[in-house]
Amino acid sequence: MKNDKLIAALRVQNIALETIRETFRKRGLIEIMPVILSTASDPLGPDPGSHIIGMPRIEYQGQKLVLTQSMILHKQIMVSSGVENLFTVSPNVRLESPASRDSGIHLFEFSQVDFELARASMEDVFDLVQDTIVATISRVNEDCSKELALWDREIKIPRKFPVYSTDQLLDKYGTDWEKLASQEATDPFWVLNHKREFYDAEDPEKPGSYRNYDLVYPEGFGEALSGGEREWDFERILMRIKRDGLNIDEYKPYLDFARKGFVPSAGAGLGVERLTRFLVGASHIREVQAFGRIPGEMVVI
């Protein structure tokens, strides 16, 4: 029953989370507790990369609620309520298609380090994430040499993360650009401009172009993080929700906060299990999760 490699991966994960928390706190971020149930959550669309087949819903005391798919809505509200730089380690439930079972990176229940910075730009996020990833790898190399040896893993300290546009990578690799570019890369890299959810800011001077980004791990480990600068103007948020065909009534409480005035912000969510997989070099994400939540597989306990 004992799984030495899983235990080693969890020790690495602990050191990684400790380092992230230390780095964020030094930058003035406040940790808030996660939200599990809400009247509305991240719709996760439109997003060509999404494999979601449904929204997890429950009913309690006659009220219909959804399980958190990300804390983006709550982050915007908190940032605009005076907690201007924040993060949380948030459990997320995303009902992934069974077709993503063998991707090596997808889970239907996972945790992410979700953060948001008031009045920040993409470049501010890039700076924070670069520092955090470098600090995490350095600390893991220093404190987890035995654990990494068990996984036969060596991690080099990355250089400054390159930045590409989706159009550049589409032209070079085609529609499977994330997988192919990740396999060729030797350092994490940023990819800009994804057509995604209503809360990611659309460039007002370039309609159809978005001020958002993904961070992709090298060596074939795939997507690490997704984020963006945020829409903060009420009329634009309302227009985007309508354009995406979402249920206005479901987002009414969120829209009520937006009408009172949101602070411009930028942020992202960094998958904890995906980070752990990258740090130890696991071939599949199932190897680093204590209780597997793999799309297409039954839950044991």
Image (cartoon, rainbow, N blue to C red):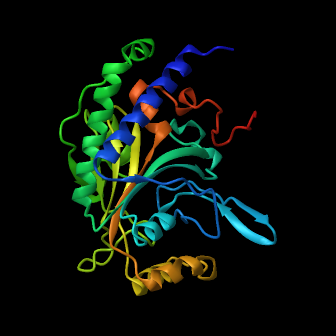
Residue visible at 41% across and 35% down in the picture: 18
Q: Residue furthest left?
A: 160
Residue visible at 44% across and 26% down in the picture: 12
Residue placed most toward the observer, 236 or 60: 60
Reply above or below: 235 against 220: below
Q: Which quadrant of the structure image shows residue 208?
A: bottom left
Is residue 62 found left or right of 221 in the rendered image? right
Residue visible at 67% across and 63% down in the picture: 66
Q: Position of residue 196 (x, y in %)?
A: 43, 65
Residue placed most toward the observer, 262 or 189: 262
The image quadrant where one finds the N terminus is top right
Q: Which quadrant of the structure image shows residue 85?
A: bottom left
Please give the count of numbered marks on the rendered protein.
Answer: 0
Is residue 246 found left or right of 187 in the rendered image? right
Is residue 288 found left or right of 201 in the rendered image? right
Residue visible at 47% across and 55% down in the picture: 49
Reply above or below: 235 against 37: below
Q: Which quadrant of the structure image shows residue 294?
A: top right
Reply above or below: 62 against 10: below
The image quadrant where one finds the C terminus is top right
Q: Is residue 70 visible?
A: yes
Q: Where is residue 23 in the image (x, y as percent from the top left)?
A: 31, 42
Q: Can residue 172 be seen in this view?
A: no
Q: Position of residue 81 (x, y in %)?
A: 43, 72
Reply above or below: 142 against 54: above
